Amino acid sequence: MSGRHTRTRSAAHSFSPLQPATFTALIVLGVLAGGLGWQLVRTRAARPGRLLSRLVPAVLLLSFIPDLLLGITHGLDATWGGVAALMGMHVAVAVAAVTSYSLFLPVSSQAVADAAGTRPPMTRKAATR
């Protein structure tokens, strides 16, 4: 094996954000914070489904900023491969977390209909009840 491959392998190996001891704690904290945010939105927002459909992608995109900064500054011996792996982990965790939140902290079907724009318009008869 050439020195170039050895150096690349050791740099990726020393990239601490990809070490289980680092990312496991951050995943737990992120999922708990996301669950708290999900719960606050679903219980306090007028249209939680609509808000969550905008908030989740926005938060996911914001979560990429530290990864990109690591890649730009080469902090923590970052490589672009390592940065891409971190970003992929963000997406995978977000998909799993949102799926779990949807199952265990469901948004009302009315809110889902609002978010999808499929709620039928209120009729005069329904409005007078």
Image (cartoon, grey):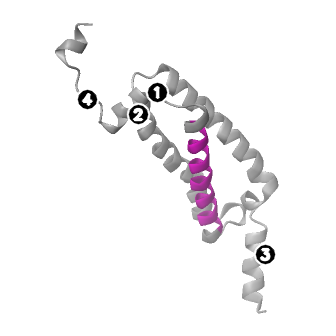
Label 1: few (<14), some (14–19) or many (≥20) C-alpha neighbours in 10 Å: some
| Residue 95 image label | none
Q: Residue at coordinates 57% horizontally, 63% vertically from top-left?
A: 72
- Residue located farthest toward the top when viewing the structure as drawn: 129
What residue type is disc 1 on?
A: Ser
What residue type is disc 2 on?
A: Val
On the image, numbered disc 2 is attached to which residue? 112
On the image, numbered disc 1 is attached to which residue? 108
On the image, numbered disc 3 is attached to which residue? 10
Looking at the picture, how far across and down is residue 91, in whole percent?
56, 54
CA gap, disc 4 and disc 2: 13 Å
Sequence-wise, which precedes: disc 3 or disc 2? 3
CA gap, disc 1 and disc 3: 49 Å
Q: Quadrant of residue 124?
A: top left
Residue contact between numbered discs 3 and 4, judged by CB atoms under 8 Å = no
Q: Is residue 95 above or below residue 84?
A: above
Label 2: few (<14), some (14–19) or many (≥20) C-alpha neighbours in 10 Å: some
